[in-house]
Amino acid sequence: MNILYISPEIAPFAKTGGLADVLAALPRAVARRGHRVALAMPLYRCVRQGGFDLQTTDNSIQVPLGQRWQPGRWLRGTLPGTDIPVYFLEHAEFYERDDPASGAGLYQYRLPQGKMADYADNSSRFIFFCRAVLEGLSGFDFWPDILHLNDWQTGLIPVYVKKIYAPRWSSKPPKTLLTIHNLAYKGLFWHWDMPLTGLDWSLFNWRELEFYGKISFLKAGIVFADLLTTVSRRYALEIQTPEYGCGLEGVLREHRGKLVGILNGVDYSVWDPRHDPYLPCHYDVATVTAGKAECRRVLHQRWNWPCRERTPLVVMVSRLVEQKGLDLIQQAADEILRWDLQWVILGLGEPHYHQFLRQMQNRHPQKLRAALEFNEPLAHLLEAAGDIFLMPSRFEPSGLNQLYSLRYGTVPVVRRVGGLADTITDCTPETLAAGTANGFCFEEYTAHALLEALRRAIWTFRDHPDIWRQLQRTGMMQDFSWDRSAAEYEAAYRRLLAGNNDESGGRNCESSGH
Ligand code: ADP
Ligand code: GLC
């Protein structure tokens, strides 16, 4: 099969979260299964300045955007270490404005008083992206059978394929698969952006593009894509409920026949303590204790922290947003910091969380370190140096960090939700006996429940080293590699091409056994 992956971010070119990691790994795994793959994303400033080998192509396009034509051009690179083509959409005004030093990100920028705001022209930027992919399609390496889309930034593509481009193309129109990585980002814009899309106003109705008086690019994708996937089985069910559906639960229930949950995987060539280049030493399941001690020593030395061996090191690596349970952290922090532990939080996000964490660090400089930055090497070192990985998410479509933690022997403490529920088995006498326990879970979204789970973890770490080693061993031996997920995506692609994706007859996430 010929598959073109389209995403607003792909590691190592541009990354704000797990989406980029997924797009770096899944196409590789699918290519290993014998398919032709290519990728497309915007050419941000960080890509231009990232030292990547970018070649110009003669694939220049004119894209209608409202009343005007916007010129664009596709540049060509490859996924590092492969010959898999990556196409970058060049439009300097739209995409080359990110600058971490001044708080300008891929989708948002920092206001003078510190708050983050969406760029006012995000609708134009991603309408342009969606149409530019389709305008440039015949100039890529191959004509795709499948367009694999990711998140709201690509949500209009299925609409364009069906309403505008399919009738124009002489080749067979590709099928569209949209992966929802995070339903909370709906791509909402005011209705007067409708003319910018070039789509007919008749689509602006509650069953298609409209969401409470606005346009939702994600809803557009949900309605028009031929197949929908999301990144864990549990999340595929949760998003059909009012609690987790972000207002889209009705439309998702309506389209449940084409919704499949496929858990993310881990790229173990990047995330494995046996060969992780960011670590001062390497370790495996036999040498985990010594390996972790050395990584921790290096971390402590860097910050001039006292190194106390039996004191657990709790780590978090996270976007600092509500999704990740930061309000629970705020409520629980005083109590946690009364305990004998050390705690490192690496993250970037909302300014009020930054302020809170800075204050806590000032009060407890020997116990809490808040690294408020995006730092890939430090993320790896923390996975290796930590004893406990804390992930108290309010919701979590899949989550990658708990999977990385398992491989690094860092025992996850998580809320039982979404992908966390699908991957972490709470430590109880029964699960220990069954050999499935690999972490600690709590159910209710309360500080009390979080504290109880963390307390159990610390008690086990300190008083039951044998059980702790069993938890580490179970986690380190588990295999969440992309090969397994890629096989499931391959089945989904085949289902699409077989035309077996009609919504009434198709397998859905409840009955398919995914
Ligand atoms: P999400 O995509 O919701 O942010 P995931 O767990 O799927 O959550 O993926 C998060 C990814 O982003 C991981 O690779 C994690 O290491 C990385 N990450 C998040 N924040 C930072 C940070 N401040 N510095 C470095 N890496 C980070
Ligand atoms: C989103 C989700 C996260 C998931 C990632 C990659 O950002 O928040 O849970 O792992 O996408 O699919």
Image (tube, rainbow, N blue to C red):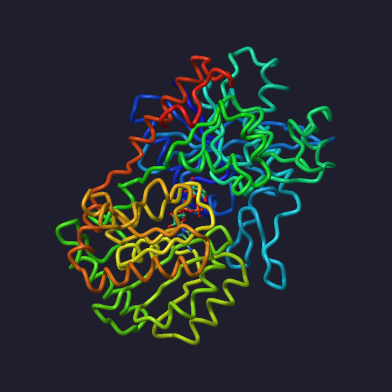
In which quadrant of the rendered image does the C terminus lie?
Answer: top left
Name the side, left or right, on which 50 lies relative to 430. right
Of 115 and 401, the residue lying toward us: 401
> Where does the image place residue 327, in percent across and percent down from the top left?
57, 68
* Residue plotted at (66% across, 45% down): 186
> Where does the image place residue 100, in percent across and percent down from the top left?
58, 63
Name the side, left or right, on which 385 lies relative to 241. left
Image mark count = 0
> Where does the image place residue 502, in percent across and percent down from the top left?
58, 18
Direction top: furthest residue: 170
* Residue plotted at (40% across, 55% down): 401
* Residue plotted at (64% across, 61% down): 104
Asked where in the image residue 156 lies, by quadrant, the reply is top right
Task: Please say if 314 is above or below 424.
Answer: below
Of 81 and 155, the residue lying toward us: 155
Task: Please say if 175 is above or below 234.
Answer: above
Asked where in the image residue 199 lies, by quadrant, the reply is top right
In which quadrant of the rendered image does the N terminus lie?
Answer: top left
Direction bottom: furthest residue: 363
Direction left: furthest residue: 286
Task: Please say if 132 is above or below 172.
Answer: below
Task: Please say if 375 is above or below 499.
Answer: below
Of 194 and 252, the residue lying toward us: 252
Of 479 and 5, the residue lying toward us: 479
* Residue plotted at (29% across, 55% down): 438
> Where does the image place residue 306, in percent across and percent down from the top left?
31, 85
